[in-house]
Image (cartoon, helix red, strand yellow):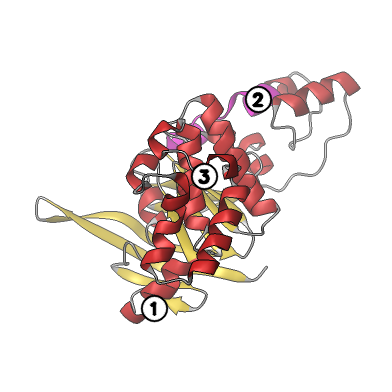
Amino acid sequence: METIIELKNVTFDYFSGGQPVRALENVSLAIGKGEYLALIGANGSGKSTLARHLNALLLPTAGEVRVDGFLTTQEEHTWEIRRRVGMVFQNPDNQIVATTVEEDVAFGLENLGVETGQIIKRVKKALALVGLQSFRNHAPHLLSGGQKQRLAIAGVLAMLPRCLVLDEPTAMLDPRGSQEVLETIRRMNRQEGITVVHITHYLDEIMEADRILVMHQGKIVLSGLPAAIFAGETNLEQFGLETPTIPKLARLLRAGGLQIPAQVLSVEGLVNFLGEGPAPAKNETRPQQT
């Protein structure tokens, strides 16, 4: 898989009370084009700090970050980096600036001087991708939480990014709004080929990720497929995380003698397995612990 973002030995310190505090320590990571990467960890693990390094919102104290070969510490590359890597944060209200949905998506393009015809085409496509085309003339403040977050995603998509970084995008949403946003994220990745980096502490959200990274105390301590992370032998509690309900139940059933495949991570998958009867367990890839 071709790499779009690469981190080499990245360390980051911030200052509190005049003293340096280490938030990231010697992090190395390659993110592939078209990959759906999930980044999880307890509060204070460094996952949001790492996310902000991916489009030069933060610059490393040591080490380097490259986006499509552009070094983030070189100021002349900042625009190209942010054009390629779009950020969506947890509170959509902080990213909404216009009085109608259509105008909000167009806002960034207008500031960049994009030609009017192109703006119209991009806005139309972005709204269609997130399922908001019928709301184009609505006032953003009248939208639901999930619709507002999808609007924030549309505003980023209109910039034609190659990578979408979402930092706790469902943290302020109800279950329905969360589902709307998650379906949008998966569609962007699977159908549009956009690289997705999804930061969350809701582990049930990322069962369909291509790869999961677990962060703890500023380091990547675990990397692997969802089946390996959640159905394997690693105790996530040691990193301040709790194994999601279905993988936990599947693990208990395995201990009772049922040969449930590691790939069974959802309610539907477990129901289907139990309905069909036991089958030989598939080989699973063990997570890599560092």
- Name the spot of residue 5 as percent of width and height, x first: 51, 68
Q: Is residue 7 visible?
A: no
Above or below, 183 against 198 in this view is above
Above or below, 149 against 3 in this view is above
Which residue type carries mark 1?
A: His
- Measure the alpha-carbon separation of dots 3 and 1: 33 Å
Tell me the tag on residue 215.
none
Quadrant of the rendered image containing residue 233: top right
Label 3: how many Cα within 10 Å (few below 14, some 14–19, many 20+): some
- Name the spot of residue 105 as percent of width and height, x first: 46, 53
| Mark 1, residue position | 77
- Measure the alpha-carbon separation of dots 2 and 3: 39 Å
First in sequence: mark 2 vs mark 3: 3
Residue positioned 75% across, 26% down in the render: 268
Label 1: how many Cα within 10 Å (few below 14, some 14–19, many 20+): some
| Mark 2, residue position | 246
- Mark 2 touches mark 3? (CB < 8 Å): no
- Name the spot of residue 59 as percent of width and height, x first: 31, 67
Q: Which of 15 and 144 is in front in this view?
A: 144
Q: Give the extent of the magenta segment.
A: 236-251
- Measure the alpha-carbon separation of dots 2 and 1: 44 Å
| Mark 3, residue position | 136
Quadrant of the rendered image containing residue 72: bottom left
What element does badge 3 sit on?
loop
